[in-house]
Image (spheres, rainbow, N blue to C red):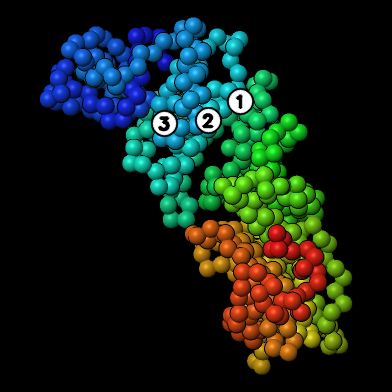
Amino acid sequence: MILAAAALAIVVQDHTALRSAPRATATELTAFWQGDVVELRGERAGYVKVYDYRRERGGYVRGESLRPLGLGAEDAPALLTVLRFLRDTPGAESLGISYGAAYLKAVPAGQLTAEAFDAIGRMAERLADQASGKGSPRVAAHLEVVEQFGIHMRSFERGGRMQMCYDGELYRRALTLPAATGEERAHAALALTRADCIDPAQPPLARAALDEERRRILDKVDDRALSALTRSRLHARRATVWAALAFEQARHGASPAVAAERALGELAAVQAGDLGADRRDQYLEATVRVAAVRWGALNPPSQTAPLSLTASAGAPGQTCITLADTRSRPPQARVRRCTYGVVWLASAQSFAQGRALALAVQPLPSWRELWVFHAQPEGWTVDVISPGLDAPEIGYVDFAGFVPATRRLLVAREARTRAGFTRRFEELRLDDLALVKQASAPELLADFGRWQDVTWRRDTLSLH
């Protein structure tokens, strides 16, 4: 992030025309955008003669579109003042980053703090978010402007659209500065550990290493000196990272108990009220991700029910589940099914007088399904209940109880959809898992009041 020491100016207006002559009717050679830096080479008739090294082109622009730029130590305080003003101004990210680059050039090394790194990082992150969403058509031009200052973006496809993320170089530098405040360290850690900035096509081993790096970054932040808002954001992020680690440990055959318990503990430390309505989705996301792995904190119970499950290795990376009826002598295997996901044996629960069993299976770090083993006239079968109809990303399904008289299965689902996070409590027909009733709260369904499972009521996170 270096600016040449010359007679420079910053362009402060979007679509500032560079003309071939100092008049409004002259040919427009190109357009400048907020934050572009040009060299001053003279003035004539209200126009300034400039040269743009990025485009290797010279011409004339109106003087009111430029602000002279000083890069001496005496200019640093004024540059910092402008940077502070633009830091939280949506739409002025490229201009603010340009002033930030000028400040870093001007400030003496002994006076440099993490404030400028934090401010530039925030603006780069916000610009990337605009490019990933419904930003202004000017975003593409602003991205080109900031690239000249060493601001690099990563992009990948997620959910049928391109996701763009700041690579976080300045946030990493902020974390290394002893003078960085607790809030600045926390902001950097939160930016560097965003789950939506993880490429979903990343190989499993690389993803596991990244989650471990995210854990180390978050553990470097001391949350005792943080504001209530930042502290809760930090706990929510730690909960999501520990949930991801629990899944990876279980998938590789290690015990996930410690990681899953840590995820539950971090989630419990979040004060949802401190996050406010604008950041409620951060709490909901953490809740759903932790709920997906909550079974990892429990040990599989000894199975004394009429139905028992055993897990064995299948093809490389697969776990095969065999359901046996222990009432037969010897016990008879009824059905077998294999998966590449994590099988949470602690969740296995027999119901319907031993004619059905529910099992939680997690194929992805934040997506847990419910397998329902049940007897049919033609034999035993396994059906899968998914958290939602959208592409698998964030969601879970809980077995919540069973109604013997009507043979209805009670389930709770929570998932992120295109419209946001949705939570539903449902009654399904056991025979074909067809939906009978659903509601946004369990108290709206009479059967949930009488037949909900006691352990589900005690341990579920769907009642948050």
| Crowdedness near tag 2: few (<14), some (14–19) or many (≥20) residues, C-alpha within 10 Å | many
Query: Mark 1 against mark 3, which lies toward the viewer?
Result: 3
Q: Position of residue 298 (x, y in %)?
A: 81, 60
Q: Position of residue 332 (x, y in %)?
A: 79, 84
58 over 446 or under it: above or below: above
38 over 252 or under it: above or below: above
**For this rendering, which residue is in front, 167 or 426?**
426
Query: Mark 2 against mark 3, which lies toward the viewer?
Result: 3
> Does residue 174 appear to the left or right of 251 in the view shown?
left
Please name the residue that numbered disc 3 is placed on. 92
**For this rendering, which residue is in front, 180 or 228?**
228
Residue 174 circle label: 1
Lower sequence index among marks 2 and 3: 3
Name the element at disc 3: loop
Q: Position of residue 317 (x, y in %)?
A: 66, 60
The residues tagged by marks 2 and 3 sit, at their Cα atoms, a distance apart of 14 Å
In the image, farthest residue toward the bottom: 377
Residue 340 circle label: none
Q: Quadrant of residue 434?
A: bottom right
The residue sitting at 24% across, 19% down in the picture is 62
172 over 440 or under it: above or below: above
The residues tagged by marks 1 and 3 sit, at their Cα atoms, a distance apart of 22 Å
